[in-house]
Image (cartoon, coloured by chain):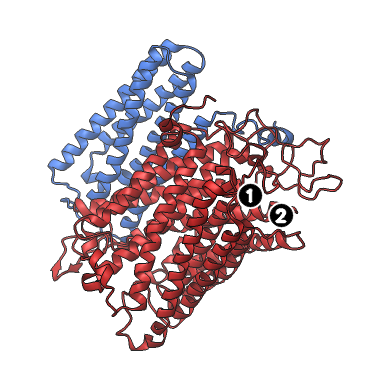
Amino acid sequence: MDEPRGFLRRYVFSTDHKVIGIQYILTGLVMGLFGAGLAVLIRLQLGWPEVPKTLLGVWLPNGMPGGIMTPEFYLAVVTMHGTIMVFFFISYVLVSGFGNYLVPLQIGAKDMAFPLLNMLSFWVALLSAVVMLLSFLVEGGAAAAGWTAYPPLSAVASAVPGSALGQSVWLLSMALFIASFTMSGLNIVATVFSLRAPGMSMMRLPLTVWSYFIASILGVLAFPPLTAAAIMLLFDRHLGTSFFLPAGLVIGGTVLPHQGGSPLLWQHLFWFLGHPEVYVLILPALGIAADILPVFTRKPPFGYRWSVYSLIAVGALSMVVWGHHMFVSGMSPFTGEYFSLATLTITVPMAIYGVNMLGSVWGGAVRLTSPMVWSLGVIALFGSGGFGGIYLGNATADMQLHDTYFVVGHFHLMIGGVTMFGMFAGIYYWFPKMFGRLMHEGLGKAHFWATFVPFFMVFFAQHFQGLQGMPRRYYAFSTYEYLREAAAQNGVISMLAIAVVAGQFIFLANFLWSLFRGRVAGEDPWQATTLEWTVPSPPPHGNFVAQPIVRRWPYDYSVDGVSHDYVPQTATASEAAVTS
Amino acid sequence: METTAHIADRWGGGTCPFDAGWKKVMMWSFIVTDGLLFAGFLGGYGYARTMATVWPDQATVFTLPFIAAMTFVLISSSATMASAVWSARHNQRAAAVRYVWLTLAGAVLFLGMQAYEWTHLINEGATLSSNPWGDPLFGAYFFVTTGFHGSHVLIGAIVLLVLGINLARGRTTTENVEMAGLYWHFVDLVWVFIFTCYYLL
């Protein structure tokens, strides 16, 4: 492939999957900073609702007049924190970013199947992120109906200030996001099917590629019904239809003219996407962690085949369990029974996968590098977060726990924690491939401990606040007698949460320092076996000079009778016996 | 019959397992995606029908013989599209071009008939938010779903126009004809579901 010349074609309007991947990662990290800033605002409010934050009052005169946050602004901040973190931070860095960067490299392809579409998907994604941020500036402020955008709050413009223009801009941004994510997903599916190198059978794919493959299929299947729902919501908002609006709705003392619709329909269509979406986010983190473990234990992963089957089973099950988000919304007990049962079935493949990750560490010659500690963090959070899911998936327990901080704690451990830790594991692991230099080890581990300890404490504690009945999305708890004890913990939790955010500056410093001063990596600094480590760092345009031939699975570590303790996937049978 | 070894080979890398290029794999994936978009509308419609106590009687609202004629036009255009693909595969370019134009004619005729039907219903007082026959959701779902399908037919017509011109000038591949065919058959299939659920059931 001809390498394009000129700065713009090479680094800005590039069709190279590696450049696009890095563009996604950088965009996502910037959005992550915004999301983290919003988290700080939330925690400042919850920790000390009555203390005026004078400086913030100067910066945000509408949302925090005199430094005291208005309830409407709190709702907008919570909504935007969730939206940005789910769709613009984790999706961009972990799913689209690493997905673009890794899939072609790991399967031995020159690029994605359709590079031009790939470039288009990035630019639409960037536009969508910019539109989402701009929604803070419109009349009435940003959307305030939660990241789930439940009607009637999201459908009636007069419901809260954010439901006016802010919600429309939110929907526009989401439409762009869905278009971009679908293009990107179609590309990954077609690439994995069609462009695997000779010898790269499905059962020789690294778990990372498997996880992106399943996640992309899920995204491609789950997003369209949300698109349909979003179109209907736009019609409800602007063209007078009543898809999601029942008769007799009173807002501000006036009866709305709508009749016939049901807000429950939105919940069904939203969660038909929303549940698979959390697996779209979490599977890549699990794939990355499971792939990093063998490199730093110097032995094959435990139960590769069963891990693959588990990923497939989880993907399939995730499409048929959306009702467990709606147990208290009004549901036939029989339907609830089904959704409980189906949800708890997910425990089986997920437990297999988790135990396989533990088994992969067992008896290994562990090298405790930064990517390794972050991967171990993934196991820890996955295990502890998963237990919360067993309670929430059970309709009986969920009646009590629904919409409390138990849920907040649970999903932050899972789609907040597992994904973020998997993402950082990936960044520390593939940074040398992307930029040719290793990140600083000491700072990497300092970053881990500065994140892991307070992060776990924050969300572990929130489970207990939830058990005490503390509801989510309330802007202050000072007036509730029964929550006096639970709310008293908010100050400490806020301090810990702010510590998590502060810890990320270690990463930022490490990232910038390593970009210019890090130790030069060479082709294969981790002594790993997959295809991306057989090419220079950073890889040239077109990745491989000659078409690589794959002769073994990706996990030939500590093979008997070989001088090195690792055998690259391209090594012939005469170099080392083929095991799988 | 294919042996397991043969199947193992085609999944073994270096080739697409479906004897098709990545373009067709992507087209099929896109069709599944787009199909689920319509599934969202149809699912919502089913939900509304289940919730509603009374639903307008379609036989009195619509002129069903006219809708049957629309359906016939669209299904026939699927047949001419299949002939276009067959001709392109057998290197009969002139015939392929002719069949593409016939398919395009079917598409335009269908759109015209749909425009006539919409005008008729709007003149009788149907809007997105209300209609003279009862449940306001009847009109809302009808216009949104058939409108969305109509926009797919319109996009298909544009694709067929570009394809016909390129094919006539010998500037396109058989694969492109096949891809347009896949999309066109999909659009027709969606109509079959809409026809059944919105007009008949």
The reply to whether dot 1 and dot 2 touch (C-beta < 8 Å) is yes
Instruction: Looking at the image, tell me whether mark 1 or mark 2 is earlier in sequence order.
Output: 1
Q: Is residue B158 above or below residue B128?
A: above
Q: Residue furthest front?
A: A517
How far across and down, in percent of the image, does residue A111 sit?
Answer: 54, 34
Amino acid type at circle 2 is: Pro
Q: Is residue A543 left or right of residue A125?
A: right
Query: What's the colour of chain B in the image?
Result: blue
Q: Which residue is mark 1?
A: A207
Disc 1 secondary structure class: helix
Q: Is residue A365 above or below residue A1?
A: below
In the image, the chain rendered in red is A
How far across and down, in percent of the image, does residue A290 sit?
Answer: 64, 55
Q: Which residue is mark 2?
A: A301
Q: Is residue A387 left or right of residue B154?
A: right
Q: In the depicted view, which residue is nearer to us: A542 or B2?
A: A542
Quarter of image, res A259? bottom left
Quarter of the image for the N terminus of chain A: give it: top right
Q: Residue at x 67, y 46 (%)?
A: A525
